[in-house]
């Protein structure tokens, strides 16, 4: 008789598990779900911040590349003509003496045109610049391309 009693003895944990399964009470508690949602929210915030910064870096890199290309076209025009193309505003294309050095001057990825210093009185200089999102003002002129304090030097 003693063996029969041991065979039917159920532990407290087994009883609790069978009760939960019988009444469909398995799953996560509200606190556990809230903790998981909070962690997901924090991770999403970090990813979005990183994504925004990466896009800003990409646009800044594009601006610098555009200005270097404009500068290269201006220097090629100068080499052929001993004078830079002049204008009150940035020209839509860079041409001189019938030669085209840049068919379409690129524009800023967000703000339209790049800054241009009026050089109509002096064809021996030029300056084009852009305000970078993650840094200083970047310029290209007859002296080369570089970060600058605020405008063309």
Image: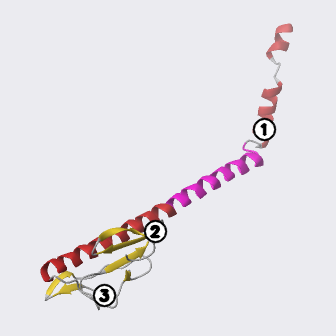
Residue numbers of the magenta segment: 27-51
Counting residues from the start of the chain, the first of labels 3 and 1 encountered is 1
Whole-percent x, y for residue 112 in the image: 41, 82
Whole-percent x, y for residue 137 in the image: 43, 72
Q: Secondary structure at mark 3?
A: loop
Q: Quadrant location of residue 115?
A: bottom left
The residue that appears at 31% across and 87% down in the rendered structure is: 119
Q: Is residue 1 visible?
A: no
Residue that badge 3 annotates: 119
The answer to which of 120 and 46 lies nearer the viewer is: 120
Q: Which mark is residue 149?
A: none
Residue that badge 2 annotates: 136
Count of picture labels: 3
Q: Quadrant of the N terminus?
A: top right
Is there a contact, CB below 8 Å, between mark 2 and mark 1? no
Counting residues from the start of the chain, the first of labels 2 and 1 encountered is 1
User: Crowding at label 3, few (<14), some or many (≥20) Cα neighbours within 10 Å?
Assistant: some
Q: Is residue 43 left or right of residue 146?
A: right
Q: Quadrant location of residue 48?
A: bottom right
Whole-percent x, y for residue 9 in the image: 83, 19
The answer to which of 143 and 27 lies nearer the viewer is: 143
Q: Which mark is residue 20?
A: 1
The residue that appears at 82% across and 18% down in the rendered structure is: 8
**Principal SS element in the magenta part?**
helix
């Amino acid at each position: 008789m003693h063996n029969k009693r041991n065979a039917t003895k159920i532990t407290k944990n087994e009883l609790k598990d069978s009760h939960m399964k019988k009444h469909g009470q398995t799953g996560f508690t509200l606190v556990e779900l809230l903790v998981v949602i909070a962690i997901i929210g924090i991770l999403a915030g970090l990813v979005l911040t990183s994504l925004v910064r990466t896009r800003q870096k990409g646009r800044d890199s594009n601006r610098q590349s555009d200005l270097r290309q404009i500068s290269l076209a201006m220097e090629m025009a100068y080499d052929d003509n001993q004078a830079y193309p002049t204008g009150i505003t940035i020209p839509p294309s860079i041409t001189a003496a019938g030669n085209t050095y840049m068919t379409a001057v690129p524009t800023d990825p967000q703000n339209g045109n790049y800054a241009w210093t009026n050089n109509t009185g002096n064809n021996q200089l030029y300056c084009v610049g852009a305000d970078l999102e993650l840094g200083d003002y970047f310029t290209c002129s007859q002296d080369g391309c570089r970060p600058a304090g605020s405008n063309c030097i």
